[in-house]
Amino acid sequence: MQFIDRTTIQVKAGNGGNGKSAFRREKFVPMGGPAGGDGGRGADIIFVVDSSLNTLLDFRYHRKFKGENGENGDIKNQYGHNAPSCIVKVPPGTLVKDEATGIVLADLTEPGQREVLARGGRGGRGNAKFATSANRAPTFAELGEPGESKSLVLELKLLADVGLVGYPSVGKSSIIASVSAARPEIAEYHFTTLTPVLGVVRVDDEKSFVMADIPGLIDGAADGAGLGHDFLRHVERTKVIIHVVDASGMEGRDPVEDFYKINQELARYSGKIARRKQILAANKMDLPGAAENLPRLQALAAKEGIELVPVSAAMQAGLQELVGRVAAALDHYVEEPDTEDGVKIYDEAPEDQDKIEITRDVSGDFVVSGKSLEKLVAMTNFGNDEALRRFQYIWRIKGIDARLRERGIKEGNTVHIGSMEFEYRD
């Protein structure tokens, strides 16, 4: 199966249904009051974790998701139906970011977990809702609120307990093939593994863990060299790292030097990864030169305070000890707080809906922005005189006229609010 672990999609939640402007027209009720119903709510875009998925491949062919609009209100105070939610299924381990801001919106890890990523617009109110003692027969109704629209970046990070890291051809694929039922492609050339491979390692009848063979890293991986960022992303969720080196150094590589180079790449990519518990697996101990390098690796392990396990995947030697050490490390694992660059994620400060800003664009036009005001514009039927007067009333009580005059607006200047354009009249 092709492995896709990063993609960008567009989502558009449904608009709310329009409210209805209507009056009671019944026999023996000559002065029937306003009876227009409210519109229904637009569809939310909801992401749901599906454990049967393990790739983002489907999103390569389906990149746009649009929710249905809510039903319009009707006569006799009939409300429009709410639109059913638009469900988007994603594999466990999917991180969702806003493409424009880079803010993490959701971390989807648990099967069945649900997150609303774009909210549908609320339905517009019918004219029955605007009846007051001063205006008993309002003729206007609200339009439906537009649903949220976003461009989202999906990143899949493997949900493995243990990650195998190391330079290409140090034997990571052979180790995971020996201790689990995973069957990665194994050959005597670099970059045999181009996609992460998962395997379940059974410790005993009651205990097991998931191991990921992360494709070989190269110098500069933290800067994106090769497939660096794509590979390093999968190390982030692992609890323990098995750092595999070629103890024999038969390809002209120094295993001690390799150890420090790989850790340098990990640290440059993420300080959290650099603090992860490591177990050093000195592989290919059956080959010439391995015995000579072993004392240097033992000295390295003592200096860095990590465990060293000499193994030979080809001869099936030392692997049970390695599995036992990993299982013990997992038993003592303590989860770090979920942070990115020292800042806790997912807790965005609520946006001030009533905040209004006035700026000038490149052509000198005035741009009025603010969530509540933009929503009011989108939901106002400017073809209705009464609705227009209500808009002008709200415009005045918010003090926007005064603020525009302070900014130097003149008669005939153009004002933009959301998608609407107005000519200023004092």
Image: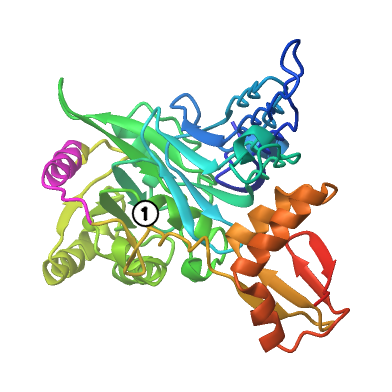
| Residue located at (18% from left, 29% from top) | 203
Assign the C terminus to one quadrant of the image: bottom right
The answer to if 183 sits in the magenta stretch is no
Residue 227 higher or lower than 90, as above or below: below
Relative depth, front residue between 60 and 110:
110
The answer to if 329 sits in the magenta stretch is yes
Across and down, in percent, residue 272 comes to 30, 63
In the visual, does 77 lie left or right of 54?
A: right
Q: Is residue 121 visible?
A: no
Q: Can residue 260 be seen in this view?
A: yes
In the visual, does 217 lie left or right of 258?
A: right
Relative depth, front residue between 161 and 373:
373
Across and down, in percent, residue 215 comes to 47, 50
| Residue located at (72% from left, 41% from top) | 143
In the visual, does 378 lie left or right of 302?
A: right
Asked where in the image residue 412 lies, by quadrant, the reply is bottom right
Across and down, in percent, residue 329 comes to 14, 47
The residue range painted magenta reads 320-336
In the visual, does 315 lie left or right of 15?
A: left
| Residue located at (32% from left, 30% from top) | 200
Residue pointed to by mark 1 = 236
Q: Residue furthest right?
A: 412
Q: Which colour assignment does the render follow?
A: rainbow
Across and down, in percent, residue 354 comes to 53, 63
* Residue type beneath disc 1: Glu
Relative depth, front residue between 18 and 270:
18
Question: What's the magenta bit mostly, secondary-structure-wise?
Answer: helix
